[in-house]
Image (cartoon, grey):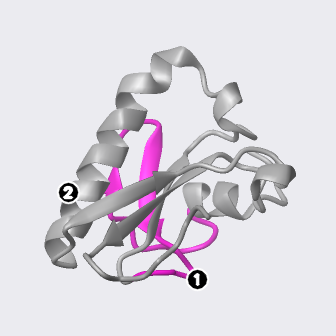
């Protein structure tokens, strides 16, 4: 855990959060600045800077957390689809240096442009 990392503080309970889903190594919470209704984050409990730092043995739990979070968000928001977005390093848009995945519920015609 890094003392100055906001996601480490959420993971340890120092910052309260409403968890959507959780397993042994990952959890999901609503995004503080959502771009769509239901936009949420899947975050590693242990501090890893990027996707490249996650041990391969965590793969099944990562998929589990992304999948279960996405299913719940689609139901709750009547979404027709979703995006999973992971930014690695600042040139790719990573702001918080703790690996996380954006789950963005989508509806036909929502006009959200993630890639142009």
**Relative to 52, does residue 113 appear above or below in the rendering?**
below
The residue at 67%/54% (across/down) is 8
Residue 102 location in percent, x, y?
50, 59
Instruction: Please name the residue that numbered disc 2 is placed on.
Output: 71
**Relative to 39, does residue 28 appear above or below in the rendering?**
above
Judge the density around disc 2: few (<14), some (14-19), many (≥20) Cα neighbours within 10 Å. Answer: some
Quadrant (top left/top right/bottom left/bottom right) for the N terminus: top right
Residue in the foreground of this view, choosing between 33 and 115: 115
Secondary structure mostly seen in magenta is: loop
Residue 114 location in percent, x, y?
55, 66
- Range drawn in magenta: 13-36
Judge the density around disc 1: few (<14), some (14-19), many (≥20) Cα neighbours within 10 Å. Answer: few
Instruction: Please name the residue that numbered disc 1 is placed on.
Output: 33
Quarter of the rendering containing residue 94:
bottom right
**Relative to 99, does residue 102 appear above or below in the rendering?**
below
Q: Is residue 94 magenta?
A: no
Quarter of the rendering containing residue 60:
top left
The local secondary structure at tag 2 comes to helix
The residue at 67%/50% (across/down) is 87
The residue at 20%/57% (across/down) is 71
Q: Of marks 2 and 1, which one's residue comes earlier in the chain?
A: 1
Quadrant (top left/top right/bottom left/bottom right) for the C terminus: bottom right
Residue 53 location in percent, x, y?
70, 27
Residue in the foreground of this view, choosing between 55 and 15: 55
Numbered circles on residues, count: 2
């Amino acid at each position: 855990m890094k003392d100055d990392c906001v996601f480490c503080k959420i993971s340890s309970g120092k910052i309260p959060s409403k968890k959507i889903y959780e397993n042994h190594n990952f959890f999901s919470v609503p995004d503080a600045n959502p771009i769509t209704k239901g936009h949420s984050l899947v975050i590693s409990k242990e501090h890893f800077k990027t996707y490249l730092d996650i041990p391969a043995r965590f793969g099944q739990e990562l998929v589990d957390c992304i999948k279960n979070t996405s299913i719940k968000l689609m139901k709750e928001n009547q979404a027709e689809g979703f995006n999973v977005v992971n930014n690695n390093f600042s040139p790719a848009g990573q702001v918080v240096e703790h690996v996380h995945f954006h789950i963005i519920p989508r509806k036909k015609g929502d006009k959200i442009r993630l890639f142009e």
